[in-house]
Amino acid sequence: MYEGLTYKLSLAFPNDYPFKSPTVKFETPCFHPNVDQFGNICLDILKEKWNPALSVPKAVEAVRLMLRNPDTDNALRQWIAELTLAHRATGDARYVDEAKTRTAAAASKTV
């Protein structure tokens, strides 16, 4: 449901980068349990698991993988996590249907 679409992300670098992680946010609205309504991302390598050996491309790749594999234990929007869990457990289509609808409205196919 996220494949083939383009999302705009912003990156802000603290003065002590690379010892502190960049702040990565979705500028394009993203219907995902690990992304809040303001575009903030809950992803461990952008927080406590960051280390100076990581790079911006690795951080962006981690965001891409997060889209594919939501972490429902660390959700920023619990109601989306609950839809995700229902989909995983029973095939309930509400998560997929809602994500496709909102994603198609927000993300584009080009930059």
Image: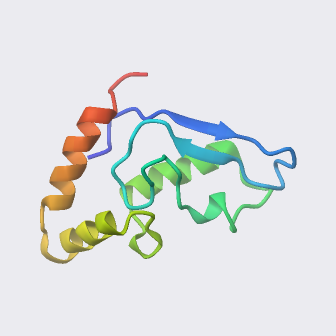
Classify residue 76 as left or right of residue 89: right
Classify residue 6 as left or right of residue 80: right
Q: Nearer the viewer, residue 53 or 36?
A: 36
Q: Quadrant of residue 30?
A: top left
Above or below for 28 versus 77: above
Residue 67 at x, y = what percent? 40, 53
Residue 53 at x, y = what percent? 78, 56
Q: How is the image coloured?
A: rainbow
- Identity of the residue furthest to the front in this view: 38
**Which residue does the image show at 39% across and 41% down from the upper left?**
29
**Which residue does the image show at 55% across and 44% down from the upper left?**
25
Q: Quadrant of the C terminus?
A: top left
Classify residue 15 as left or right of residue 29: right
**Which residue does the image show at 28% across and 41% down from the upper left?**
103
Residue 109 at x, y = what percent? 32, 26
Above or below for 63 versus 28: below
Above or below for 57 versus 107: below
Q: Nearer the viewer, residue 62 or 73?
A: 73
Above or below for 30 versus 7: below
Count of all numbered marks drawn on residues in the image: 0
Residue 7 at x, y = what percent? 43, 35
- Identity of the residue furthest to the top in this view: 111
Q: Quadrant of residue 105?
A: top left
